[in-house]
Amino acid sequence: MSEAHQDNQELLSKGSLDSAAPRFILISKSNSVDVDEIVIDRHDSGFVQGPKTNNDGLNEMINNLGEKDPDVIFLLETLGNGCFKNEDYNDALRYYRQALDLKMQTLGQEHPDVADTLSSIGMIFKNKNLLDDSFNALKASLSIYQANAEKKRRDDNLQVKAVNVINDIGNIFFEKGEIDSALAHYEEALIMARKVNSPGVIADSCSNIASVHALRGNQAAAIENYHEALEKLIELCGEDDPRVANILNNLGTLYFRSDNFNFAMKSYKQVLKMRRQLFGHEHVSISDVLVYIALVHEKQNNFERAEQIYDEALRIATNELGDKCIRVANIKSRLANVYEHYEKDRQAILYYNDALDIYRMNGIEEDNYLIQDNLQRVNLLDQKRQNEDLVELFPCFNPFGGSHTLLHIF
């Protein structure tokens, strides 16, 4: 194992990417543009039981216009966009696969619209933790964008799309813990973004670079890049923009990981205030920042307050996304951890198992850390309960061995 890889693994082992610490919001196409611009593709993994709603209207349009009509493709993508927005990724794939097939038939495999679809499928797979599939889709998308940009040398729109995908590929490496590769992609994206003078993409790239520096503990470089990102975003969009809140969220996470919990709390509360003004009190992004505020309370051993805030976050996420969503599972896992601190083992096991059921329902594989972390906690708590039951039945029983063992009572 290389020294760099060992360093990256050490960073990960400190909780930089796990569910027990706030995550940096890596800026990507899916959170830097409106969801209506997002489309998806064919690389699914078998999760394709689509919704029955809207199918009658879709079938009627296909019968009237023919399946290759542009309006049919547009409707398929619109249905997919709605599923994507609601995090119904399995249903979104069904619609986007159909749209992609029709695009390839009518436009050809190298058309930029096909690249749009491949780019978006990459985002779906990333959200489903299928990082290798995500990488492959994004690389295919990037290849098409770059080939078309070569033909249309002054098409800045294609260049911007290519930069977005390079950032997205960097995010895949970041999630996999390959931090050097992530940084290389972010820096490449920043150079290209400066060439086309796109303030929004410059801001996205700076924010992602800052997250790498923050992860490595290089606080000065992280703050410098976050501030440039904020400057560009405020210049482009004003202060009341969701991405401004995202960068403030990242600053909070930077402080959290530096054990500066007071500044972290101030940052997260500012994000909460901004998001409530932008989206209202019941938006799913409110649930996200509440989770981070609860994590700060956990770090300060204020478990009662953490439990209250997790409960509120869980209520909002369940109402907005349904009870089968991965984000709901993540919150249940955090609540289970709080119950462990209270020694409410039965409730903890219940919530860990709920989280496991949701992860598996969403196609998360057994070797994924989301499954393994929760499964380990359940097994440890089950063993603890079994030992406690034995001690209650046989007071001389010592679950750790030694002189007081079960044999001594016979």
Image (cartoon, rainbow, N blue to C red):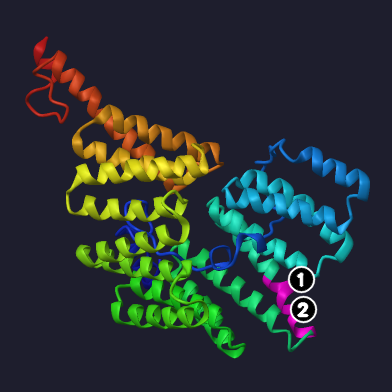
Q: Name the spot of residue 270 as percent of width and height, x first.
A: 32, 65
Report the number of discs: 2
Task: Find residue 93 and report its horizontal and vertical position in percent.
Answer: 68, 49
Label 1 CA crowd tier, 10 Å (few <14, some 14–19, many 20+): many
Kindly identify the amino acid type of the residue bearing the numbered disc 2: Asn
In the rendering, at what x and y percent does residue 144 appear? Answer: 74, 72
Tell me the magenta residue range: 142-151
Q: Quadrant of residue 52?
A: top right
Residue 174 is inside the magenta segment: no
Q: Who's the residue at 55% across and 86% down the image?
A: 191
The kind of secondary structure element at disc 2 is helix
Say which element carries label 1: helix
Q: Nearer the viewer, residue 237 or 89?
A: 237
According to the picture, the residue beneath numbered tag 1 turns out to be 112
The label on residue 148 is 2
Q: Nearer the viewer, residue 21 or 406?
A: 21
- Is 150 covered by the magenta stretch? yes
Labelled disc at residue 292: none
Expressed as whole percent of the image width and height from the top left, the position of residue 147 reads 75, 78
Q: Is residue 382 visible?
A: no
Mark 1–mark 2 CB contact (< 8 Å): yes
Q: Is residue 127 visible?
A: yes
Q: Residue at x 30, y 61 (%)?
A: 269
